Amino acid sequence: MAKFICTKCTKVFSDGNEGAKCPQCGAGYPEVYEIKNSDELLRKEVDKIMEEREKLGISNLIGGLECVIINTERRNQKKAAQELVSTTGLEYEGTVESENYHTCILRQPGNADFLIRARRHDCNPFREINKAVKTAFYPNTRLETLVFKAKDLEKFVEIQQERGVKFMTEDVIHYNDYNFIQTMPSQYTGNSIGFIEWLKEDREYFNEGTRRLEWDIRKPDRPHLKNIGKLDHCATRVKCEDRDAAICEFLSLTNYHFDFAIYVDYLNSITNVARLSDNEYAMVFTAGISPYESDEKTGPTEKFVHNYGHRVHHMAFLTENIEDTYENLKKDGMGFLVELVGSEDEGLKQTFSQPSEYTLLVNEYIKRYGDFDGFFTKSNVTLLTAATDNQ
Ligand SMILES: [Fe+2]
């Protein structure tokens, strides 16, 4: 059944037809329209955001991705860190105990840092949004926060608070080596966006009041892991009706721009790409073209959001010698949702692992060839999206 949205009062309703009146506020056309994503509407909104960003003087205050925070259940934290160093190029740097967290630090030169974390106490601001059909055993598990480099963080936060952005803390938190703040989880994506302003040496997470824990996490000596490089993109799956808002929210918080969208009609899925510049980490948002109806009818993207809630679905790592690496990861026991798709001629090869039982995240391995300047190909996007139908 078609769904409609009233842009005046944001009521979503389904018992309507062309020219329907909003049952909440009585508004009609042009305030009421059928929910079906199109880039025409999105591009208009994006233009407004870019103008506002310029006007507010925040265009150049936020840079690239600095770190990714993945929270797990306490029982899974070490296993999640061990799994990630065993299936990527990341190395284990150490574990920090702070007042509220145990945090394993994974890093690799040229890559964002990965903080694999579990809360020491039961208070978790993400708990409500973690609730979904298939997440009963994972009330604390999520890629929670993407942290971007900031300058003049106080000014940035003041401007964003005036725009109505809600942060987890009233003020910027000042540590010895950095200033930090993060937004409340987004109602559209479940993601929090973090901002870090380094004061001294880049990327020092040990502070006064933290202590180092000796945990036995070891990177296995497997040469093919050296082929796996930096984080290329993360893909967040969101509801059809939240696609435009999710993208606009992210653009208004960062210095990213909306690049393009690929529509795969028969899977009811749109893959949308936001970028900072070539060769930098990209943010991908995937949503249905039309809203969830039933598992059978709705396609893998909307079905995933229905079952797991809106969240990051996969993390994509740039991978050299991808055929060899893929074969060796399989020999190591890693399961995959799909074989390698694409070809050198098309400019791109990719595959998806099975989701992790510790983080719920899929790893994508991606090789970009030569001077291919498209970010994705429609055929790969179609095959990869279809492969997630059984999750
Ligand atoms: Fe991807």
Image (cartoon, rainbow, N blue to C red):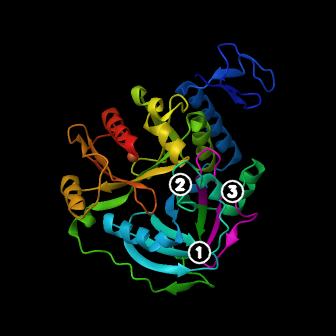
Residue 327 disc label: none
From the viewer's perspective, tell me whether residue 205 is left or right of residue 122: left
* Image point (40%, 59%), residue name: 356
Magenta run includes residue 37: no
Q: Is residue 239 above or below residue 189?
A: above
- Closer to the observer: label 2 or label 1? 2
Residue 360 lies in what quarter of the image? bottom left
Residue type at numbered disc 3:
Phe
**Which element type, helix, strand or loop, lies under badge 1?**
strand
* Image point (28%, 60%), residue name: 334
Q: Is residue 385 above or below residue 39?
A: below
Q: Which residue is mark 2?
A: 135
Q: Which residue is mark 3?
A: 156
Mark 3 burial class by Cα count in 10 Å: few <14, some 14-19, many 20+: some
Q: Which residues are drawn in magenta?
A: 167-194
* Image point (62%, 84%), residue name: 208
